[in-house]
Image (tube, grey):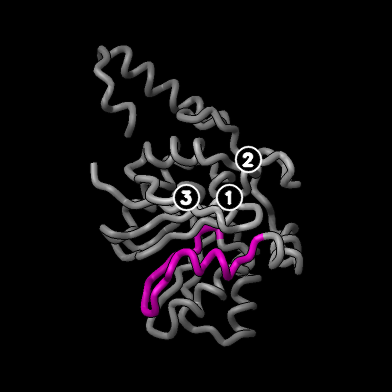
Amino acid sequence: MWHTRLRVPAGAALALTFALAASAQSGVHPVSGRRFAPVMGVGGAPWLDRSEREMEEAPEKALDALEITKGSTVADVGAGSGYFTVRLSARVGDAGRVFATDVQPDMLDLLRARLTERRLTNVTLVHGAVDDPKLPSSSIDLVLLVDVYHEFSAPQAMLQRIHAALKPDGRLVLLEYRKEDPSIPIRIEHKMSVAEAKAEIEAERFHLARVDERLPRQHILIFARREP
């Protein structure tokens, strides 16, 4: 954690800890000051599957940037109705595994139906918690968060558990609409800047390895796992 490196008196350290906790509980990130966005409910599923998404987000181009190999184990955290899950399933192949995790049972029901319709058998559905994606320890090659990190209400706890789930050389990838570009027609609380993501995620034992800007509207932010 970033604040453990500060040399401060015990009383001041305790006060800082309480301040950070209070900030997080109020819906503001204690590192960046960013306000957490509300979570999209199952009523927003049609928007997740809208036909325009292909043009606006170029999902296959995004996955091309990640160079996912056959046989990999990947996690789609905040999978929703499975728009990216089915694409990840094809990328990892029959020898690979996709863990699709979401906090909303209704979203998982939609995803389950989608997998059944397509007869996909290399996807494991996981009912996660707001502070825990419930992924197996030290087993994931890549964790993908597509337009979801900004909605986390407990981002520090989530990142700590994602860190534990990744293999030593595992990667964490965020796709987030560019806050730096006001012309992108998304509400500002559903956008993130590179600076915000870097500050928040590097505080939890990750390193921003690469920023890829090949997509029309989103950053691809690739983080490497690091030890303390």
Is disc 1 in contact with disc 2, using a CB cutoff of under 8 Å? yes
Residue 73 in magenta? yes
Q: 47 left or right of 159?
A: right
- The quarter holding residue 6 reads top left
Amino acid, disc 3: Val
Residue 80: % across, % down: 61, 62
Task: Identify the element where label 3 is drawn.
Answer: strand
Q: Which of 18 and 147 is in front in this view?
A: 147
How many numbered circles are shown?
A: 3
Residue 199: % across, % down: 44, 35
Density class for disc 1 (Cα within 10 Å; few <14, some 14-19, many ≥20) is many
Task: Identify the element where label 1 is drawn.
Answer: strand
Amino acid, disc 2: Lys
Magenta-colored span: 57-78
Query: Would you name the residue on which mark 3 appears?
Result: 211
Q: Image quadrant for the C terminus?
A: top left
- The quarter holding residue 179 reads top right
Q: Which of 3 and 172 is in front in this view?
A: 172
Which numbered disc, 2 or 3, marks the residue closer to the eye? 3
Residue 171: % across, % down: 37, 57
Task: Identify the element where label 2 is drawn.
Answer: loop
Residue 105 in magenta? no
Q: Residue at x 37, y 73 (%)?
A: 72
Q: How far apart are marks 1 and 2 (CA)?
A: 8 Å
Density class for disc 2 (Cα within 10 Å; few <14, some 14-19, many ≥20) is many
Query: Would you name the residue on which mark 1 appears?
Result: 176
Residue 135: % across, % down: 39, 61
Query: Would you name the residue on which mark 2 appears?
Result: 179
